[in-house]
Amino acid sequence: QVQLQESGPGLVKPSETLSLTCTVSGDSISGSSYYWGWIRQPPGKGLEWIVSMYYGGSTYHNPSHKSRVSISVDTSKNQVSLRLSSVTAADTAVYYCARWSGDDLLEFAVDVWGKGTTVTVSS
Amino acid sequence: DIQMTQSPSSVSASVGDRVTITCRASQGIGRWLAWYQLKPGKAPKLLIYAASTLQSGVPSRFSGSGSGTDFTLTITSLQPEDFAAYYCQQATFFPLTFGGGTKVEIK
């Protein structure tokens, strides 16, 4: 059974960089044929796709955040990480780690989600 | 961006009721639509993909239909564990976009 566990600081100051890690168990990021990425939900709002990557392949960003977002993989720890720079209060959200159900983002759905981690941007 | 409009934004229902949620895309997306269930503190759950295909392990009281711009999620005989928020998501165009959500509440 594949499980995703997000971790990171719950509080980040404005203008700083938010860094989150997703630890994957039950699957190998480098050995799988899936996309991995991040989705968030601001308080009282809907879900928003941020970024996704295929290990050794393509990365796709939501243009709304592209200039501030990076995604990376640590194969030794089987982790996928998100960095979001120059955060503001608008980046306050629950951040979810996600695995897409195929080797593409289009036409496929997120079949495995983490429970999410709450990040608050405040001084 | 493709705008996904869900309705209603909330619905009050009783155990055993039939609930229908609609999702409308701002332009045609074929059949590449998914439905998710969200509960506080729990990992979201994929219910339906490709508009009408039931994800493995999801009860058959959940069903999806539609293509192009109009889609529906139907829950027949609502169960206590179904009180949650539901979101649609299009997977045809970048950026991937979600509907605003529908909260199914206990009447």
Image (cartoon, rainbow, N blue to C red):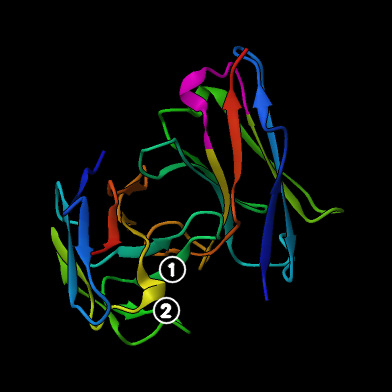
Mark 1 crowd level (few <14, some 14–19, many ≥20, 10 Å Cα): many
Coordinates of residue A102 in the picture (x, y in percent): 51, 67
Residue position marked by numbered label 2 in the rendering? B55
The residues tagged by marks 2 and 1 sit, at their Cα atoms, a distance apart of 7 Å
* Residue drawn at x 23%, y 64% as measured from the top left: B107
Q: Residue furthest right?
A: A76
Coordinates of residue B28 in the picture (x, y in percent): 15, 55
Determine whether label 2 and label 1 are within 8 Å by CB.
yes
The quadrant the N terminus of chain A occupies is bottom right
The chain letter for the residue carrying disc 1 is B
Q: Earlier in the sequence, mark 2 or mark 1?
A: 1
Residue B25 appears in the rendering: yes
Residue B30 appears in the rendering: no
Magenta stretch in the rendered image? A84-93
Q: Is residue B37 above or below residue B2?
A: below
Element at label 2: loop
Q: Quadrant location of residue A21?
A: top right
Q: Quadrant location of residue B95?
A: top left
* Residue drawn at x 74%, y 71% as measured from the top left: A26
Coordinates of residue B92 in the picture (x, y in percent): 30, 55
Q: Amino acid at mark 1?
A: Leu
Q: Is residue B102 above or below residue B47?
A: above
Mark 2 crowd level (few <14, some 14–19, many ≥20, 10 Å Cα): some
* Residue drawn at x 49%, y 54% as measured from the top left: B40
Relative placement, left or right, of A5 versus A114 is right
Q: Is residue A86 magenta?
A: yes
* Residue drawn at x 56%, y 42% as measured from the top left: A95
Residue position marked by numbered label 1 in the rendering? B46
